[in-house]
Amino acid sequence: MFKLLLIFTVIPLIELTLLIRLSYHVGTLYTISLIATTGIIGAILAKKQGTSVIKKINQSLSEGKMPADSLIDGLLVLIGSAMLVTPGLLTDFAGFSCIIPFTRKRVKFLMKGKFSKLLTTGRVQFFSFNQQQEKTVDIVEDEDNIN
């Protein structure tokens, strides 16, 4: 709950404050130009990096390999693209760090470490169901409905 409050209220307030202060120091036109420029550059980089990641995923799949790292790269490019579309200086910085390959490697390393920690502490768990289990559940539900 606290994280959602932070994401949807505190961060936009900080972004707004930074943009107002920036426009006070350099002017409104330059501030709007900066936001538009980072959005355009971000969109171009996101398209280029996204296409590159999709090619890597397709290549791994055609070789019969699981494209785990490429999937993480794709997720980071998607997150970075969303952040670059959002106006603001902090979100632009975070977005560029997710899209630029050099910084994305560091973000991916940190993300893997965090996810590994969540798995070892048991805060995140994966469950899989095979077809036989699903059929068993369906049969039990049907028998309950008959009675």
Image: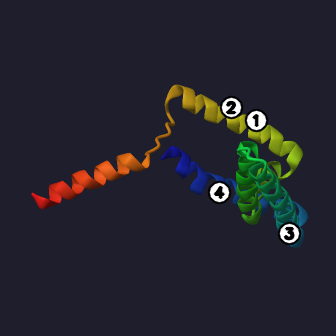
Kind of residue sitting beneath label 2: Gly
Q: Front-most of 8 and 147? A: 147
Image coords of residue 94 (percent x, y): 77, 50
Kind of residue sitting beneath label 1: Phe
Mark closest to the chain's N terminus, 1 or 3: 3
* Residue 13, numbered circle: 4
Image coords of residue 68 (percent x, y): 71, 43
Mark closest to the chain's N terminus, 4 or 1: 4
Q: Residue at x 74, y 44 (%)?
A: 65
Disc number lying in front (4 or 1) = 1
Kind of residue sitting beneath label 4: Leu
Q: Secondary structure at mark 1?
A: helix
The 10 Å Cα crowd at callout 1, few under 14, some 14 to 19, many 20 or more, is few
Mark closest to the chain's N terminus, 4 or 3: 4
Q: Secondary structure at mark 2?
A: helix
Q: Residue at x 82, y 57 (%)?
A: 55
Q: Gap in Å between the C-alphas at discs 4 and 3?
A: 23 Å
* Residue 137, numbered circle: none
Image coords of residue 140 (percent x, y): 23, 51
